[in-house]
Amino acid sequence: MIKGRIHSFESFGTVDGPGIRFVVFTQGCPLRCRFCHNRDTWDPRGGKEMSAEEVVNEALKYKAFMEASGGGITVSGGESTWQPEFVEEIFRLAKENGLHTCLDTSGVMNVEKIDRILDYTDLVLLDIKHTDPKKSKWLTGFSSDNAMKLAFYLKKRKIPVWIRHVLIPTITDGEDNLKSLAYFLKELGWFERLELLPYHVMGIHKWEDLNVEYTLKDIEPATKKDVNMAKHILKKYGIYAR
């Protein structure tokens, strides 16, 4: 019986894939994103230990709602691929029970470590943190190279992907970054949608609870105007974002 560590569940998620989703937030993440709103998921020793079977059984309680809406199960984090064998088993059991599977990942892990998860994955939500590898490392602790490699690997395997990008004022919303993102996506040519996620500060209290400094405290949340401006810039380079 394969076990892993779970941070929490969301029974009726509507933003992490199509339809109504049972969202599994796994525990543990190697990234150190300065804007993380789930700071309490970083520690791989935290959360609750569960078996993959227990997780899927919990999800199956909502199967009727998922089927009626075209939804399914989404594994997020933390970093979902930090526990590859555990997530593979969750997805394998989910597919046995007729559930649509969605992997929400930053793409930080090497493809070789997560390839077997993809055997049971219907959709990937891939978060491109920053197109500049050096700026990505400053922002998250890691270069964006692995995420971009994963995008092309998903194309090779013909696994549907939604690209996500957190729009952080003065950090990721500049024209140079958005232009680079547009060129990358045009070269990739394999994604169903691009979602711009407005930066928010709703998770700052988690940093404060852990007595950890939040270094982006002077950055204002992204406004609707910021998002519309980013969409306009991307459109100029041939990419349409949601």
Image (cartoon, helix red, strand yellow):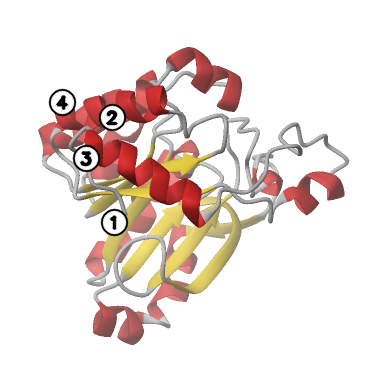
In the rendered image, which residue does mark 3 sit on?
A: 239
**Labels 3, 2: front one:** 3
Q: Of label 3 and label 1, which has the lower sequence position?
A: 1
Front position in the image: 58 or 13? 13
Residue 199, can we see it?
Answer: yes
Q: Which mark is residue 187?
A: 4
**Labels 3, 4: front one:** 3
Front position in the image: 197 or 113? 197
Q: Quadrant of residue 22?
A: bottom left
Q: Which mark is residue 150?
A: 2
Q: Quadrant of the N terminus?
A: bottom left
The amino acid at mark 3 is Ile
10 Å crowding of disc 2: few (<14), some (14-19), many (20+): many
Q: Residue at x 44, y 27 (%)?
A: 130
Q: Of label 3 and label 4, which has the lower sequence position?
A: 4
In the rendered image, which residue does mark 1 sit on?
A: 92
| Identity of the residue furthest to the right in this view | 211
Distance in Å between CA atoms under marks 3 and 1: 34 Å
Distance in Å between CA atoms under marks 3 and 4: 11 Å
**Picture coordinates of residue 185 (x, y %)?**
22, 32
Distance in Å between CA atoms under marks 2 and 4: 14 Å
Front position in the image: 11 or 113? 11
10 Å crowding of disc 4: few (<14), some (14-19), many (20+): few
Describe residue 95's horizontal placement relative to residue 171 as left or right. left
**Labels 1, 4: front one:** 4
**Picture coordinates of residue 27 (x, y %)?**
60, 47
Describe residue 184's horizontal placement relative to residue 76 as left or right. left
Q: Of label 2 and label 1, which has the lower sequence position?
A: 1
The amino acid at mark 4 is Glu
**Picture coordinates of residue 9 (x, y %)?**
55, 66
Q: Residue at x 55, y 53 (%)?
A: 223
Distance in Å between CA atoms under marks 1 and 4: 32 Å
